[in-house]
Every structure is written in structure tokens, then in C-alpha cells.
Amino acid sequence: MPGLYLDANATEPLRPEARAAVLAALDLVGNPSSVHADGRAARRLLEFSRAQIATAFSARAQDVVLMGGGTEANAAAVHALGRGRAVLAGATEHPAILAAAPGATSIPVLADGQLDLAALDQLLAAAGPALVCVMAANNETGVLHPLAEVLALCRRHGALLHVDAVQAAGRVALDFTGLGAETMALSGHKLGGPKGAGALLLRPGLDLAPLLTGGGQERGRRGGTEALPAIAGMGAAAAAARPEAATRLAALRDAIEAGSGLAVAGQGAPRLPNTTSLIFPGLPAETLVIALDLEGMRVSAGSACSSGKVARSHVLAAMGLGEAAGHAIRVSLPWDAPADAPARFLAALARIGARQDRAGGASTPRVAAPH
Amino acid sequence: MSASANRPIYLDNHATTPLDPRVLAAMRPWWEENFANPHSIEHAMGRAAEEAVEAARAEIAALIGAEAREIVLTSGATESNNIAIKGAARFAASQGSDRRRIITVATEHKCVLESVHDLAAEGFEPVILPVGADGLLDPEALRQALSAPTLLVSVMAVNNEIGVTQDLATLAALAREAGALFHTDAAQASGRIALDVQAIGADLLSLSGHKLYGPKGIGALYVRRRPRVRLAPLFSGGGQERGLRSGTLAAPLVVGFGAAARIAAAEGVLDAGRIAGQRDRFLQALRGLVPDLVVNGDVGQRVAGNLNLTFPGDTTAEAIMAAAPGVCVSTGSACSSAEVEPSYVLRAIGVPEEAARKTLRIGFGRFTSPADADRAAALLGAAWIATTAPHSAPFVSAE
């Protein structure tokens, strides 16, 4: 399919190492829980993949619980840790967290998208026993939250910390043991692995009351036959992802931002190297995304799960960008983004801008705005 | 899959089935060409992935006589069973229903029993019905259990250890008369017996990809639309699958599941006839070596591929398996097969513990050849002889 894929935060292209691991795993017949020779071969690959994931994020293999994806990992953490505790969640968290804790208290963010630590301190002082849920990196803006400072506040107030690292994993270095959080959620396909696998990392000694019960797999912490090919691909992707490749992606991202001349949500904050949220004042975001798609540029107006809907971004609204929120597009560079990505994207954007000018400003007869 | 000489003979098709090469071929483009998120419908690649997912959903629906929009895709049958049972109970309770009873059967898969058990802590009343020595649920026992207001009845279509097939249509009709929902765990049934949600009268039905020669990591839950069955999700998030199961759909796995369903719909009947032939051939050959073998569970009302065999004499299942490393069989369900305690399914049908310890589950599948059946019978027969009469030389080489 021709075009340029710039929607990595929806899903990363499959890494060749992951593809090879998936295809090799598909040739194994057995169920990893079976005790016969075929089952043991499947178990060996399962444990090898688990160790790859553990190594990539500085966790112990026995603390890696394999699951169906990042949404499930987040839900499982909140389910197990949130019992009997007040849940505090960042205002810009992914819907997976917001839905898992519908009664959660929202922790505000600053204008640059980073968590407001002073507000968190006050909320924790008032909350009693609490669970804090904070994403390592935001999926729409790429803004990184100050996790070490968040953890220090949690410890001071006796709160637990769950980190949603779905978007950060593989793009910036993550040291789970060094950080010291209770749990961390990972998604295979955002690492460049296949869809259908995820993991929850547990602090050593922490047990997990299962969300999916039955069968006793994963030491009773997650029932169901493990999705071996997807997990093998996730392990290979975790091993192959090189956060040091960040420099290359950051340079491409910077070129896009500078060349576009557009305002960028969260620009002042530390961010993922691959993500930019561009505010294009001339067109509604949905219209611009369609126009870019016709130019072969695959971007999105928000997160993929909600991209069928026209709902306003709660992320940009929380940053005080209410008006601009309807005009922001997310450009997220995949791990294999080509060097000419900025030039091609900027040329497409310029063609749309020129048509826009000919059509006379904000009203665009060429492309009907959905709403 | 067809065996090389050094490859073990795989007779554990209840634990998981080998991937059909046609399924692999269907999945590959979704790993190798278009990797897009099927929910990214703003761009062309995402829409192509979405179309493939929807085509697969239609194929899965067709396998069980459902509509595509009645299929909720999940990570597997365990998740489907959790959503069906906990979701139905929690939604009804949230609507103020005073029905609290949840009825299931002693021989269900662990994930059904544990889901029902979990609900006891939330104020529901689990009722676990016994089965007969044949493994079948007596409809009269269900009728009596339904005398109290009941929310849900969950009965598996095919047992994962003894292969018996329950009379779902009769059981579902009883549930419906009593105003209860009827769920069936059909993970072991799909592709092996005909399944039609209308003929059964099922409200909820769970499926698994990897029990159907598809990939692991994908399953489905059928949720009836007319009349509509309402469920609370197990977890939420991006709102995919109409809010019932959030999370990015694994497009290649969905496509593989769809291909597996399409193949099963076209070839299931042929498979069943051929597989029954290998099973009978195996049993006849093994009986020639091992007298007084006992087949557990109803012989007539069971899937073609299943045998559950208690061996005579002073031996154990583990000893026989260890003496026959060239055959992959099991002592019970895979998830609990690492446990040493004997099968609760066998206990439920009245098999004494001493006999249960000498019992093997043998599962024939689409790729079992007549030669596999012959060789497996010879190897297991020799293994039995070697373990029961260690001082006499076996008359068949155990290799």
C-alpha cells in the first residue's frame, strides 16, 4: 500500500525480529501448559519470551504476567490494586485507565501536559490509602510524566503506583526495578510486536488477584491459554527495540515541527521522540486527517480506539487547549520511519494548505467536515 | 503437521490444535503487508484491516448460525466465559434484578467454575449440578434447580476431558421457560459438532481459535441480539467491540480465526467422519494389547476425536506417558495437567481415584493419520506392558 505511515502510536509496524518469532512459534503445536514433549517445547518458548520482556524493562521474569494486551494489563492492575483504595488518575490518562476506575479522582496536568505534582501532593494528603495511575508517556502528545517524583510522593503518602507504559515502552528507556512502582502495563503491538499480547510487570513480592479467572495459568494470576505466537513476537520486539534509536526519530520529529510552522501541544515538556501533536488552525482535525489520507499520509486526530468517534480530545482539553483541541492532529513516527518522512509530510501539508487558500479560508468545499 | 519419523505423534487435540496451513496463509499478509490498527479507520490502511476483521467476524458468525454483529471478539474462550458469566450477572444486578441463582455443572472447565465461584462473593448463589456416570446432565436435575429464580445457566457443549456432548437444546429450553439466560462454553465443540445458536436456543456461546486449528490468543463470545442479551464488560477502555471488550483487536489473529471457522464450516463433517475412523482404529489396536481397557463417559454421545481411557493393572498414567515419549497425550485438561491431583471431571462421573490415576485423555484431530493411530496404539500398548510387567520383556518394541 503506497503512502507514508505516521500513526505509530495507534500501532507500530511489525519488527522483522518479531515477525520471525511469530512465524516460528506458529509451527509449535503444543499448549504451554501440557506436560508432554510438544507442551514442554511451547513452554520453553513462552519462558524465553517472558525473560526477553523482563530483561528489556529490568524486571524479574517471575514478575511478568502475560496477558491479551495493554488494555487488559491496565484493567488487571486497577482491579487488583484499587480494592479498598481511593484511585487517583492523571487527567490525560488513556481511556483504559479512566474506564477501569470510573470513580477516580482526576490529577490535573500543567499547560505543558505534565502531571501537576503540587496538586498530586494535596490530593494524596486528603485521600487516605490510594492507588495512583499515571502513564509514562501520553498517547496523543507524547508528553512524559515525571515518574520518579510521582513515586516519591506516593511513598511519602503510603500510596501505590501503577504506570501505564504502553506508549513509552521501546521508545524511551524504562527501568521497572529502578523506578520501584507496584505495576507497569505493556502492550506488544506498540513495541513493534504483534497485536494480541501484553504484560503486567509486578514489583517483586506483589501478588495479583486475577481479572480473568480459571485454568490457573500465569501462576493463577491470569487464566487462559497463553497466546504463544503473539507473546513470542512481543518478546522479540522487546529485545529488538532500541530506545537509543530515539535520536534519529527525534530529529525527524523536530524537522516536521519546524517545517510546519505550527503550534505543538506540550512542546515545552519532555516528550517521546516520535510524537507530535500539531495544531492546524485552518481546518477541523477530522477533515485534515481525511485530506492527508488522500495524500497518502496516515495520521490520526486522536487515539485510534476513539478515532471513529468525533469526541473532543480529553487530553488537550486537560491542558487548557479546549479551542485548539478540534484542530490537533497526531503525527507519530514508526520505528522504521524513512529519512524523507518530514519532506513528504510537509509537502502534503503544503498542498492541502494551498487548496485551502484557493477555496477561501476556513470553509472547505472540497472536503466535507463530518460535524 | 504430517509427522516426520522423529516427531512425536500429537494426540492432545483438546489442549490445543495444530495450526492449519491454510490459516497461516490467511494470516501472513496481516503481519507481512498491512500491520495497521483495525480501529484506525481514519486512514486507508486501518480501513483495510477493519474490513478483514469484519469479513472474519462474518465467517465466525456463520459457523454457529449467528449474525456478524452478535460476535464479540476476545483473547480466548477463558475471557469469553468470564465476560459471559460475570457480565450477565453484574448487568442484571445493576438493573435491579432479584434473580441470584447461577447454575452450572460439576464437569465444566475451570474458568467457568471459577467465574461462577467468584460471583458468590458478590451475592450470587452458585448451584453446581452433578452429572451421571455417562457424564451427561439430567434435564430433570436442571428443571429442579430452576425452581428458584435463576439468572443464568451455563453448560458446556463438549467436555474437554471425556468428550461427551450435552443435549443443549433441551437444557436451553428449560432455562428459557424459567426465564434464565443460557450460556454454553463451546470451545471444545466448534468445528467438531454442528453448532447453531438458533437450534440450541443459546443466549451466549463461547468459542476459542486455537481449539479450531486457528491461532492462540483469539476467541469470541456470541451475544444474542433478538431478544437482546445485555452484559457488563469485564474491563473497559477504548470502547472497542461495542464497549463489551476494549483493547486493540489483533487483526492477524482475527483473520486466522475467521479462516479456521470457514474451513471448519466446510469440512467439519468430513473431519468428524475421518477422525472417528482413526479413533476406532486406534482403540481396536490398543485393545489387542491392553485387555479390559475402560472408556470413560458416554460412548455414543461424544465427539469423534475423544477417548478417555482407564488402563488396567498396577500402573499410573504418568508412568505410561513416560514410557511412551513418542506420543503426546495427557492426563486431563492442559491448564491443570501440571497438577498431581486426579481429574475432578473423572471424580464427578464416579471414577474411583485409583482408576483416575491410570487414565489418559487422548484427542485425535484433523491431522491425525491412520499411521499415527497405529503407531500410537503400539507405543502406548508397549508402554502399558512395560510399566505393569517390568520383569517380563515387552513383546512390542517401545523404541
Image (spheres, coloured by chain):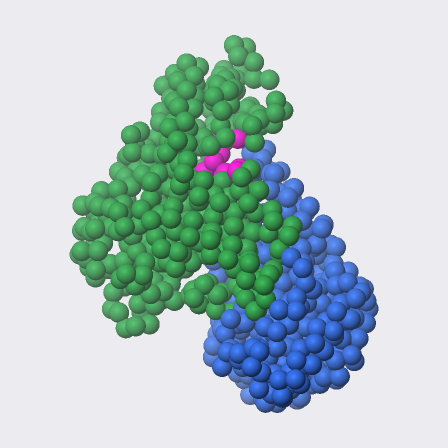
Chain colours: A blue, B green
Q: Is residue A17 visible?
A: yes
A106 shown above or below B225: below
Q: Position of residue A4 (x, y in %)?
A: 69, 64
Q: Residue at x 42, y 40 (%)?
A: B264
Which residues are the magenta region? B10-20
Can you say which quadrant of the picture contains the C terminus of chain B? top right
A323 shown above or below B119: below
Q: Nearer the viewer, residue B157 or B69?
A: B69
Q: Nearer the viewer, residue B173 or A248?
A: A248
Q: Position of residue B226 (x, y in %)?
A: 28, 61
Q: Which residue is drawn at 53% across and 12% down?
A: B396
Q: Does A107 appear in magenta?
A: no
Q: Is residue B328 left or right of residue B186?
A: right
Q: Which of A279 and A288 is in front in this view?
A: A288
Q: Main secondary structure of the magenta part?
A: loop
Q: Where is residue B92 in the image (x, y as percent from the top left)?
A: 30, 67
Q: Is residue B79 left or right of residue B127?
A: right
Q: Is residue A204 visible?
A: no
B146 shown above or below A353: above
Residue B98's image quarter? bottom left
Q: Residue at x 49, y 24 (%)?
A: B369
